[in-house]
Amino acid sequence: MGDKPTLKTPPCELKKKNKILGKNRIIINILNLVFLGIKHMDWMGGQIFYLKTPLLYSLLNSPKNKKKKKFSMVVNKFSF
């Protein structure tokens, strides 16, 4: 009567799965950043680290309209 509802996979297995997924996600994110950085190097010269991802760019504080204009320019420079 006092039994906990049974999970399909034991909690320790779930933890392992989540750890692996988390690591993979981090690796993929790093690879994406590196790849974008390389793409930017081709045409941005010295400003390699100015804009790598929309997320990083949104962290830089600048007026919204300027941000949109700048980002659309970046997207137009290379196709994903």
Image (spheres, grey):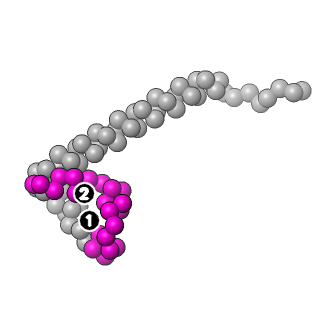
Does the magenta segment cover residue 63? yes
Magenta segment range? 45-67
* Image location of residue 55, percent across then percent down: 36, 56
Name the N-terminal-most of marks 1 and 2: 2
Real-space Cα separation, disc 1 to disc 2, in angstroms: 9 Å
Regarding mark 1 in the picture, which secondary structure is present there? helix
Q: Count neighbours of disc 2 (C-alpha within 10 A) and say few if under 14, some if 14 to 19, many if 20 or more.
A: some
**Pointer 2: what residue?**
51
Q: Amino acid at mark 2?
A: Leu
Q: Is residue 28 above or below residue 60?
A: above
Residue at the location (42% across, 32% down)?
23
Regarding mark 2 in the picture, which secondary structure is present there? loop
* Image location of residue 49, percent across then percent down: 22, 52
Residue at the location (23% across, 68% down)?
70
**Pointer 1: what residue?**
71
- From the viewer's perspective, tell me whether residue 24 is left or right of residue 19: left
Which quadrant: the N terminus?
A: top right
Residue 10 showing in the rendered view: yes
Residue at the location (20% across, 66% down)?
73
Check if mark 1's residue and mark 2's residue have beta carbons within 8 Å.
Answer: yes
* Image location of residue 9, percent across then percent down: 63, 25
Res 57 → quadrant: bottom left
Residue 68 showing in the rendered view: no
Of residues 62 and 30, the one nearer the viewer is: 62
Does the magenta segment cover residue 48? yes
Q: Amino acid at mark 1?
A: Phe
Res 32 → quadrant: top left
